[in-house]
Image (cartoon, rainbow, N blue to C red):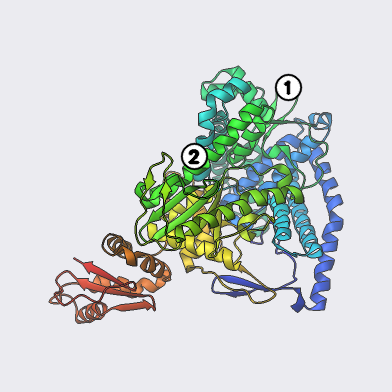
Amino acid sequence: MEPYLGAGTPFVTPVVDGGLRRFRRLGDVQEAGLRAAWDQIHKAEQQLPRLLEELSQTALAADPVMLYSSLHVLDAMRRSSQPGHAMFGSDAMVEFHGGLLTAMPADRVLQRLGTDFHPQALFDMDRLLREYARAESLAHQAKVLREGAADKQASVLHMLQMEQRFDRMQGYSAQLRPIFEEITAPLADASRAVLGFALHQALEAADVYHARQTARLGEVVTEFENASALLASSPDREQRVQVAATLTAGVAMFGASPVEDDLPGVLATELNAPHEEMARLAAALTTPLGSQPALKTLGDTNSLRRRPVIGLDAPRSLWARPGDFIHEALDWAADACRDHPDLLKSFDKQRQDSCEELVRRTLATVFGETYVHHGATYPAPGNPDVDVLLAMPGAVIVVEAKGGRFTDPARRAAPDRVNKKTREFVDKALDQNARTIAYLDSGKGTLRSRNKKRLLLPDHLPPAVSVIVTLERVDPFATHLPDGGKRSAEPKDGTWLVSLADLVMVADTLRHPAEFYAYARTRAAIAKTGAPRVFVEADALAAWLDRRVQPVEPAPDEIIFLDTVSEAVNDFYTQVITPGSVPPARPHSGILAEILDALDVIHRERPQDWNALAIAALAVQPDDWRPVRKALRAAQPVTTGTRRARKRARRAADGIRLSPHLTVYVRSSTDETSPPPLGPTTLLLHTP
């Protein structure tokens, strides 16, 4: 299936090699191909005003509110059956359509409420939204080409503009939910006293209303499936397609969220909460019709993005897609506190405190509480502290956590606001990590905990891995690590910049210290070389799980991207458990459990060798463990088993060389021969 935003422009044809896509810049492009691409772009730019007008006309020819609600169901049905990357941008376009409704005069929309419309209007609107999205995408590509990318900051601006238009994914619910709760739950009393409701209730309301609508949709799907089972299958393909389209439209229209006469009453009943409290909450979640007359283009700020309830004439309202609220919940909470300075100050402090604590908790889950320190200080001008420090034999990770907010102007790529956030999120953090790493490298090691006690760091500490964790998801910063001009130093081995939600997702996948450490080290090195470019952390994780992606040095005038998408990761974290369904497997690094167990033994008995062995073991391609796997099966007392198995066991006992940095010996517990020489390149596996 062709991607929702189209295949792009024919400027360049990538060379796909080893999980990477290599592009050469425009110097190698044929003149005819370049002319054709610009013609395609100019045509798209000219279509934008016409498409906007057709979107409005099509909406007002039907019941625009229920058409919008039905589009959400149609989009959800399609997204559930297609790979995530193929449908990138579709949810943003349905949201944009809702924004256009709230930009219209309220009376024009209200006049059409309850109007019957043909199901074809649903497909017409869906087609127009896709055409508009593709035209906007091409127009943005033209903007990028005209302006060029003289430096990283320009690339960041262009990527922010793209995300503002099409990206609505802040992470996976499994990670976003506990982050939101960690920040908002402690503010329950304060927010209820000021706002008349508790901030955390917004997500609870979204959850219960989403469950209610999911149940409603399930009933509709069952009814249509039962009805379709009674239809005789036609031998005519065109007729079968028509029937399928009719059934799809029927599910979308009858399963859509309804206009509620009393949404606060519904929420009050579901949550067992006071109606007045839910009325104030619903008002804080509402974008009224006619409230966004300035919204004209996809790049404009759309209030519906974080206030997703469309307010009709009082008291009627529509909440079309409550399940998506999790992605904007934190921005909504900041918006709700905006007019109350003391509450907003408390909210921002809680963001920073929670960001640091969740980073500490995440690393402790992988490496153990003993080795993870929060807020350690060291003697230097300004008495600097380390937000989170992992220091164990064989691994050091220095983390600077940034809980600040990324504002709407910055999301729209306003250069001055982006520069300000670059200095806050990147420059300052890199400078702080560089100072900390330099102090650790000096060997002085006089650190103190938050309660002023001296921290005794273990021996055998390797060079530190630098990590910046942002509470906000700012993929352009992670991709390009721009320089805001206020950076006095930076870690020499690179820095992994990652959102908190993605850090938690990585730690949930890579649960062994060696796995997580090797990945973090690799991501820092990739940021150092600038290739391959990583736009989404889940894609980088998938590429590392599947192929052990490593940093590469691009040739002059070459741009290198990943050629891997995160379908296995997406499938696991977006799974919907239904009766009889088989849940997808947790993504795995492919390393043998016996190797990880051996690394644990190394950490206890030969900690000085753990770093080199962990790095070497996690650099082995998953498929390359096959000879070790066979040797483990064959390693048994030599008096049993086949002759071939005994031969394989003897060979494994003499060492399996997987790389210049790693040789694995497999020995049976009954093997009484002398053990192999042990060192930073050897692993010994004992079998029962």
Q: Nearer the viewer, mark 2 or mark 1?
A: 2
Where is residue 330 drawn, in percent x and y?
60, 38
| Residue type for callout 2 | Pro
Instruction: Look at the picture and state if 307 lies above or below 513.
Output: above
Left or right side of 644 for 65: right
Dot placed on the residue nearer the N-terminal end, 2 or 1:
2
Please name whichever residue, 110 or 405, is drawn nearer the observer in this view of the structure: 405
Q: Quadrant of residue 309?
A: top right
Q: Residues within 10 Å of mark 2 (few under 14, many from 20)?
A: few
Left or right side of 554 for 519: left
Instruction: Look at the picture and state if 367 lies above or below 633.
Output: above
Please name whichever residue, 277 or 557, is drawn nearer the observer in this view of the structure: 557
Left or right side of 387 for 156: right
Question: Which residue is located at x 34 percent, y 74 percent?
Answer: 681
* Mark carried by residue 418: none
Please name whichever residue, 183 or 488, is drawn nearer the observer in this view of the structure: 488
* Residue that mark 2 sits on: 178
Where is residue 193 drawn, in percent x and y?
59, 20
Instruction: Look at the picture and state if 445 lies above or below 592.
Output: above
Where is residue 677 drawn, in percent x and y?
25, 76
Mark 2 touching mark 1, by CB under 8 A?
no
> Which quadrant, please, contains the C terminus?
bottom left
Check disc 2 and report its element: helix, strand or loop. helix
Question: Which residue is located at x 34 percent, y 79 percent?
Answer: 657
Check disc 1 and report its element: helix, strand or loop. loop
Does residue 110 appear in this view?
A: yes
* Residue that mark 1 sits on: 314
| Residue type for callout 1 | Ala
Q: Residues within 10 Å of mark 1 (few under 14, many from 20)?
A: few
Does residue 531 appear in this view?
A: no
Instruction: Look at the picture and state if 89 lies above or below 331.
Output: below
